[in-house]
Image: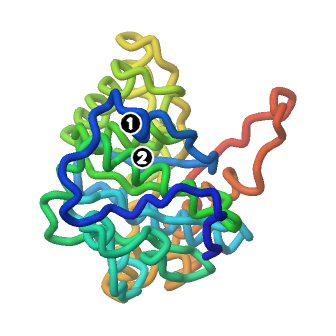
């Protein structure tokens, strides 16, 4: 990972430095210019729907296409991306929060050139990150400069203050659900919260663990109709990921399914999503027809 430029701010948190500065102080991070790297937050209304699998496999599939991806385990209460990637970090965000390490010291190499900023397991102070330190984190990630095309944030599940804040800070967000009613209801609750908070653009909707294309399409249609009616929000349907036993098999191997079982239906779905993101679209894509996405057989 390239070092930051000489003029970049040092965002290392110092132990014993006392409380964070008040929002009105001149050096508060809200007054700093955040470097622009395209950032996508991966979210879900509830856990167990495959959110972290989506983040990991999308990152690795993007890396295979030549994108330089920084994957951030922003599920600060229950990080898991290092396990899914099969890497073993020596330092994580807990070391950054304590002031022991800078963000650039945490970055480790994963498959297909993906770089990972690992979360801190068993650190309750990370799960309750205050606004100041969260802003320090976001701006520090943007300053890991020079060789990053995309930042993917794997956020906490549910309508949490932390997860919503990361989704609002990102350029784009993805809401993942399954056809099950609890997941459906929680996904809509998350979309509603993002709408109320003034999300910049509607999140992309993804349906996982679907028995087939018809079930996935029906689930997406129901959420989109409700969002259109009650939120006046048009959710783009990004696609579906089949219920595929290869996904948990790959997880047990501590390897992304796109590399462990590249011919699996889920692997094909992840690659299709990556191809839709990379290479970057034209700045003026109005004349380009929308690319449909469907489950692979």
Q: Nearer the viewer, residue 263 or 201?
A: 201
Residue lying at the far right of the rendered structure: 287
How packed mark 2 is, by other alpha carbons closer than 10 Å (few <14, some 14-19, many 20 or more), is many
For disc 2, the marked residue is 207
* Residue 263 in the figure: left or right of residue 105: right
Is residue 28 among the parts visible in the rendering?
A: yes
User: Percent position (x, y) of residue 100?
Assistant: 30, 75
Which label number is shown at residue 219? 1
Q: Is residue 16 above or below residue 171?
A: below
Horizontal and vertical percent position of residue 15: 23, 66
Q: Is residue 256 left or right of residue 151?
A: left
Image label count: 2
| Quadrant in the picture for residue 211 | bottom left
- The reply to whether residue 297 is visible in this rendering is no
Q: Is residue 239 above or below residue 232?
A: below
CB under 8 Å between callouts 2 and 1?
Answer: yes
Q: Nearer the viewer, residue 121 or 43?
A: 121
Residue 269 falls in image quadrant: bottom right
Q: Residue at x 73, y 36 (%)?
A: 290
Frontmost of labels 2 and 1 is: 2
Q: Which mark is residue 257?
A: none
Quadrant (top left/top right/bottom left/bottom right) for the C terminus: bottom right
Which residue is located at x 61 percent, y 55 percent?
Answer: 273
Q: Label 1 crowding class (10 Å Cα cut-off): few <14, some 14-19, many 20+?
A: many
- Is residue 155 placed above or below 26 in the rendered structure? below
């Amino acid at each position: 990972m390239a070092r930051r430029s000489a003029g970049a701010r040092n965002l290392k948190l110092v132990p014993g430095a006392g409380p964070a500065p008040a929002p009105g102080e001149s050096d508060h991070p809200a007054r700093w210019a955040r470097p622009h790297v395209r950032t996508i937050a991966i979210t879900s209304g509830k856990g167990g729907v495959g959110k972290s699998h989506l983040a990991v496999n999308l990152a690795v599939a993007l890396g295979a296409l030549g994108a330089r991806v920084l994957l951030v385990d922003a599920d600060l209460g229950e990080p898991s991306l290092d396990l899914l990637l099969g890497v073993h970090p020596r330092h994580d965000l807990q070391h950054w929060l304590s002031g022991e390490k800078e963000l650039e010291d945490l970055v480790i190499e994963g498959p297909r050139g993906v770089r990972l900023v690992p979360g801190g397991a068993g650190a309750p102070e990370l799960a309750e990150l205050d606004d100041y330190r969260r802003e320090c984190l976001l701006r520090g990630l943007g300053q890991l400069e020079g060789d990053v095309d995309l930042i993917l944030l794997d956020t906490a599940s549910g309508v949490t203050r932390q997860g919503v804040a990361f989704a609002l800070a990102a350029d784009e967000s993805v809401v993942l659900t399954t056809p099950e009613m609890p997941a459906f209801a929680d996904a809509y609750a998350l979309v509603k919260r993002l709408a109320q908070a003034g999300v910049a653009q509607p999140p992309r909707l993804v349906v996982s663990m679907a028995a087939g294309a018809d079930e996935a399409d029906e689930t997406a249609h129901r959420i989109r109709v409700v969002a259109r009616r009650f939120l006046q929000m048009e959710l783009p349907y990004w696609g579906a990921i089949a219920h595929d036993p290869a996904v948990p098999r790959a997880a047990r191997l501590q390897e992304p399914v796109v590399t462990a079982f590249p011919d699996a239906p889920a692997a094909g779905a992840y690659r299709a999503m990556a191809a839709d993101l990379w290479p970057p679209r034209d700045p003026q894509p109005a004349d380009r027809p929308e690319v449909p996405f469907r489950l692979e057989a």
